[in-house]
Image (spheres, rainbow, N blue to C red):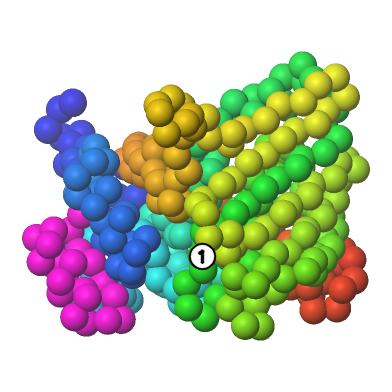
Amino acid sequence: MSTATQTTLHTAREGYDRDLRVAVLGVGMMGQDHARRLAQLTKGARLVAVSDVDGARTDAVAAEFGVRALHDPVAAVEDPEVDAVVIATPGFTHEGLVLKALEAGKPTLCEKPLTTSPETSRAIVEAERALGRQLVQVGFMRRFDAEYERLRAVVASQELGRPLFLHCVHRNATTPPNFSSEMLVLDSVVHEVDAARFLLGEEITAITVLRPGRTSNAPEGLQDPQFVLMETESGALVDVEIFVNTTTGYVVRTELVAERGTAQIGLGVGLVQQSRAGWGGGIPADFKERFGAAYDVEFQRWVDAVRSGAGVDGPGVWDGYAAAAVCAAGVESLRTGRRVEVDLGARV
Ligand code: ISE
């Protein structure tokens, strides 16, 4: 590449021929994981700053990676030495930060949820549309998992015929403090919503959330497990067992039932060991372990897309909006016990 070309490739629209300078906003558990990924693994990217409402945590993580500590996340978005941002702050802060990033023309990888309501997510869809180019990718990492990609290819090839059911299992060992019954839908089932849309290539039109008997392992007042039934445009049904205090480990499994066969992912049959103690394998402790490789691929493809000027390579703001709309309907169903229809309105 000539020197003249090199000096022109330095904006989000044109792309970058040098390492992308990335700031991570929010360095709790997930943000720290992403900061490490950017600092140590992702090619073509350089972690340059971190920011968190917790000043001491910002300073500690910044020192660990030898990068700048920026205590104001908005200043981090606007910083001229930051090319792109990863948003891993709590969901309620996403709307303001994503809008700022759009205003500043900064490519953004925003952890799910895009925002906490369909209305605010829709406003972001419209703001990006007004800008005339894609700048925001949403962190639905399962789309980068090899098993999900294979299952999607099976559906797309139509070799098993029309999809009739997706049976999904989503189990966590425990929940963090203050995890509410609504969060089973907003924080956990949201992944199944996006995965179903990704696998089937269609929108969800209605959702019903049922309250089965509670496990005694769940904290007082938490409706755990829940059973979710979603309907799609083509008439396929997606059911989800969401159970987040199993005490055992992290299990995410999906079975497609189609006209001429079935296909399953997430069986977790990695290493099977035999010894005097018996035979068997391990269960991942959490999503960082189960989807670690998917996060790595997600970040690499995002950085490559931003450097090439494409902006995103994966789920965009429409996907974030659709998931927010289905989950809001799910929360309504959880509260009322009724089936709730989802109307996304016209695609913009
Ligand atoms: C968590 O926030 C995640 O995003 C995980 O992928 C999900 O499995 C878990 O249930 C959520 O709490």
Q: Picture quarter containing residue 128?
A: bottom right
In the image, what residue type sits under mark 1? Thr
Q: Is residue 296 above or below residue 72?
A: above
Residue 315 image point, x, y percent: 55, 47
- Residue 14: percent from the left, percent from the top? 34, 43
Name the residue nearer the viewer: 112 or 307: 112
Residue 10 in view of the camera: no
Q: Is residue 62 magenta?
A: yes
338 left or right of 330? right
Left/right placement of residue 328 relative to residue 136 reads right
The residue at 34%/64% (across/down) is 29
The residue that appears at 53% across and 43% down in the rendered structure is 142
Residue on which disc 1 sits = 174
Measured as percent of width and height from the top left, residue 178 is found at 52, 81
The answer to whether residue 184 is visible is yes
Residue visible at 19% across and 80% down in the picture = 56
Q: Check disc 1: other Cα within 10 Å, few if <14, some if 14-19, many if 20+.
A: many
Identify the magenta region: 47-69
